[in-house]
Amino acid sequence: MSFLSDFRTKIAAAIAVVTVLAGTVVYAQLEGTERGVAPLASTGDFEVMGVEVDVHGDNAFDARKKGWEEAQRKAWKMLYKRTQGGETSGLPDGTLNTIVSAIIVEQEQIGPKRYIATLGVMFDRARTGSILGVGGRRLRSPPLLVLPIMWSGGSPQVFENRTEWQKAWARFRSGDSAIDYVRPYGSDSESLVLTAGQANRPSRRWWRNILDQFGAADVIIPIVRLTYEYPGGPVTGRFTARYGPDNRFIDSFALKVDRSEDIPKMMDQGIARLDNIYASALSRGILKTDKSLIIEDPFNLDELDLEDFDLDEDLAGEVGGGEDAASEAGNSATESAGEAPIAAPAAATSISLQFDTPDVGAVGRGEASVRAIPGVTSASTSSLALGGVSVMSVTYRGDISTLAQALRAQGWQVQQGAGALRISRSGQ
């Protein structure tokens, strides 16, 4: 008996030691300090980055002041060209001071009487939009969770360590993007849930739990694979844009730098191009929420508060109308016996319509032309690209082929796709 008692004591002690060690390992995994970079707060202002200035002044302070003013003038011309597609003579400094909300210092060198810098300028969207005429027209995606995967040295990493890929996503300013990015940074248990292996798990139940945790509707998976020629030498980055629980491919491209020190700059350029790829996929209807990730709550009629509805007047009108129509229906029963039943009205269909918008007036003319078609209940521009191709959301009572025929009758050249139309005028 004493032998069994000693054996049980040793087993209990061993289990206690293993439990303590396991707890220590888990604690170490969750409490690592070299993990995660909090993303920068992004506003909805217009952003113009990469503005280079080189000015002289009476002293260092005066040179910097003149440099910032010069950056505002250059940034306004760059923003105008980006949104309007043309050149402008600029705005007075007093007007620029009222619409510029912030100056971002990317890199600067300050001398006794000289200022050399690369700056970013942020313009207040409300005030600037009223001048450009594009303030209120923005297409914004549903919240999309970002799962940034970096392959380096033959192994993938997400939030296990602080990688340059994660740092680049953290400093990316997404306020002017069409994509609503949800950017985790690996705090607490996030690094255990958001891993590279999760991108290849199509289980909808597991993805719903993760997306609900972060308040996202779907997931995008930007991937970069780094290839080093030799330590400190040229580095090639292969960037790939994927999305959804099925890890679907959208597009890819490659960038290269001559030195390993320039990897952060390459990462920033890669994210900017990936953002354009995702925005283009959104406007073309490729990047859309997977319906299998949407959980619809059951509808219970018994839980409705019928006191909020004035049913008495509606029922009285229906009953009165029914009595008046009963005799007419009886008199015409023999006449309509051989006739076919009246077809139900066509269901409303949401159609994405792409059209050219060389200037602001083309937007209004395009919308007015589509609204004039019988059966169109709404037509509004959801993605504006002045000087390019904009996207109009159209609600139409009928099928897409009928709408295409109606547009051709108005003189449009129509190209039909899956749930979308591309229209243009002759000569465009």
Image (cartoon, rainbow, N blue to C red):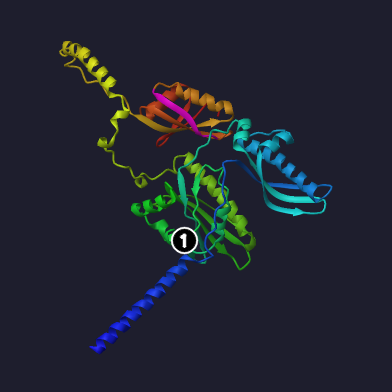
The answer to whether residue 337 is above or below residue 292 is above
Q: Residues within 10 Å of mark 1 (few under 14, many from 20)?
A: few
How many numbered tags mark residues here?
1
Between 229 and 36, the one lying in front of the other is 36
Whether the magenta-drawn stretch holds residue 381 is answered as yes
Q: Is residue 84 visible?
A: no
Provide the residue span drawn in magenta. 375-384
Where is residue 28? Give x, y as percent: 47, 69
Between 420 and 184, the one lying in front of the other is 184
Between 398 and 194, the one lying in front of the other is 194
Where is residue 255? Give x, y as percent: 58, 55
* Quadrant holding the N terminus: bottom left
Q: What's the amino acid at mark 1?
A: Asp
Residue at x 21%, y 20% (from the top left corner): 340
The answer to whether residue 42 is above or below residue 198 is above
The answer to whether residue 388 is above or below residue 218 is above
304 left or right of 282 in image: left
Where is residue 22? Give x, y as percent: 40, 72
Q: Is residue 309 visible?
A: yes
Residue corresponding to mark 1: 188
Residue at x 28%, y 82% (from the top left corner): 8
Q: Residue furthest right?
A: 58
Magenta span: chief secondary structure: strand
306 left or right of 236 in image: left
